[in-house]
Structure formats: C-alpha cells, structure tokens
Image (tube, helix red, strand yellow):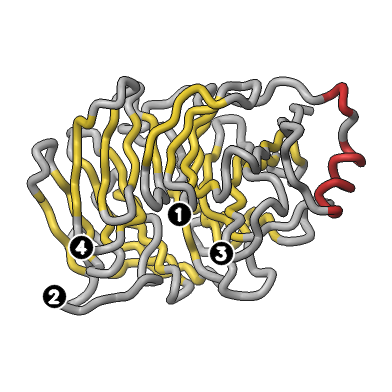
Amino acid sequence: MRNILLPATTRITSGFAMWLLFHFTMAAFAEGHRFACADYTQGKVFIVAADGKVEWEHPAPSCNELWVLPSGNLLFTTGHGVKEVTREKKILFSYESKSEIYACQRLPNGNTFIGECNSGRLLEVGPSGKVTKEIRLLPEGKNGGHLYMRNARRLANGHYLVAHYGDQVVREYDDLGKVVREIPAASGPHSVVRLPNGHTLIACGDIVKDGARVFEVNAEGGTVWEIKNGSLPGISLKLMTGLHRLPNGNTVLSNWQGHNQSGTGPHLIEVTPDNKVLWAFADHKTMHTVSSVQLLDVPGDATRGEVWH
C-alpha cells in the first residue's frame, strides 16, 4: 500500500482521523506521488514533490483546471482566462474573456481548446490568441450563468464532451455543435474524461446532498465503476472535481473542500478498480480547495490524449 502524506499541521475531522488510525501507523508516512495541482480558493497552481513538499507555485486566480505539458510548462485556467507559464514563470500564452472559464486543453496542433461557461462557447485558439474555431452551445448574447459548464474536452474525433453542471448531465457534441449523446450525472458533473476504451469517466459535485461521486460508464451508458459516499471507510467525499486515470487502472480523485468543508478530508485520493485506497494527500495549511490534479510520475503526452485527466 502506498503511504499517505500528512504534514503535522494538517487539520482533520474525527472520521478522517479514525480512518488514518485504522490504516496507518506513524512509521508508515513515507513517499507518495509527485504531482501538479490547482487550488481554486487560494488562486495558485503547485508542483509537489513525492515527499509532499511544494517545489514550485504560481498565481492562478480561481483556477479550476491545469495541465503539465511535455515541455514542462503549465497550462491553466484563471477564472476568466487561460495561461501557459514556463517553470521560469514566463507567460507564453494568454487568453482573456468576460465569461467565466473552467476548461482548457492543449491540442496536438498547438492550439488551445477553451470552454467558456457563461457564453456557452467552445473555442479553439491559436498560439497568438486568435480564435480559429467557435461553437456556440447557447444563442449569441444569452448568459448561461455560473453553473452552465465546468470542464470540457475536445476528443480525437473532433467531438466535444461538456460537463453541464447545473443541468446535471454530460453532453457530447459533434464538430458542428449538435448533441449526439447525453449521460445523466446527478449532483452535477464537474470533470469528464473519455478513456481509450470508449468509456466515460465523470466526477460529480454537491448539488444533491451527499451526492458527490465518481463513476464510469460504457458506450451503452451502463455504469461499470463507481465511488460514492460510503465507498471508502472514514473518507467523506465533498465535491469531486479533478480526475486522473492512471495506466494501471487506478484513479486519482480530487476531493474539493469548499462550501464550508475546509479541512474535512484528504485533498487527493488514489483508488484501485476495486475501491481500495492506495495513497492520499492532505496539506490543509498550504492548500485549501484542490480542484485539479495531474500526476507527474506516470508517462504520457498531455497534448496527444495520453494523459487521461
């Protein structure tokens, strides 16, 4: 079993403490994963070493999504924009909007996919910041509101997956913006990933009381895997945001603890396909609400669909 990283300053609830005592002794607190993550409330992105210490950080207001690119640069959202920043903190790409933005993705051709929440626009933007493609999911001038869209993905076939949080549904659109599939996602889908086998992995929020969960559906819409409250002894799921499915079949979950839930559980949890916890991370002194995660000790080119995140 991989070991949990918990600095001495971590604040935990009694339920989380009971889980820790059940599974670990103090001698077992050793190395975990190296990873990058975003803290929405603090407005920062971090790179964290396997021993749990922060290696690098950068301001990122209201950041909901981040990627570590093959170059080592970080691509992330900034509330109303998207930036690419080098490790030397030089800005290489910047896009700004009046709309809230919760989704970004670097495409194989070097363009950046961006999902605008309020405007309902799916955009492909060139390196210079020029929009090269636009799909409107809402009529021009209509404001979809704060809950209209969370994360979204452009797929290899040119389709788009969109997490419609307020509508509690994931929709797949073709390259012209026509709905070709709907997947019900009670309690609000936040993140959505299309896996190489055609399955869809979805993280849901807290619209429904105790409704936070992560589930995987096959091409026919049947649920083939699920984590929900009660699945992990001693761990209460708050609002599931970021995801990273690993090549070995494990899934790393981001357990967002906003909405007055701060400090009530681990920020990150790695689970096996049979729902066993292998690793967890919590540092409530350094981080508040971890909204996105990408492990850095697994292979994969984030621009070519090899990072399932």
Q: Which residue is mark 3?
A: 205
Q: Earlier in the sequence, mark 1 or mark 3?
A: 1
**Which residue type does callout 2 highlight?**
Glu
**Which residue type does callout 1 highlight?**
Val
Q: Residues within 10 Å of mark 2 (few under 14, many from 20)?
A: few
In the rendered structure, find residue 140 and report the number of the disc placed on it.
2
Whole-percent x and y of residue 168? 48, 73
CA separation in Å, label 2 and label 1: 25 Å
CA separation in Å, label 1 and label 4: 24 Å
**Which residue type does callout 4 highlight?**
Lys
Q: Residues within 10 Å of mark 1 (few under 14, many from 20)?
A: many
Whole-percent x and y of residue 262? 64, 55
Whole-percent x and y of residue 232? 78, 51
Q: Which residue is mark 1?
A: 192
Which quarter of the figure has residue 51?
top right
Q: Nearer the viewer, residue 137 or 6?
A: 6
Q: Horizontally, is 54 left or right of 101 in the view?
A: right
Query: Which mark lies nearer to you, 2 or 1?
Result: 2
Q: Which residue is mark 4?
A: 98
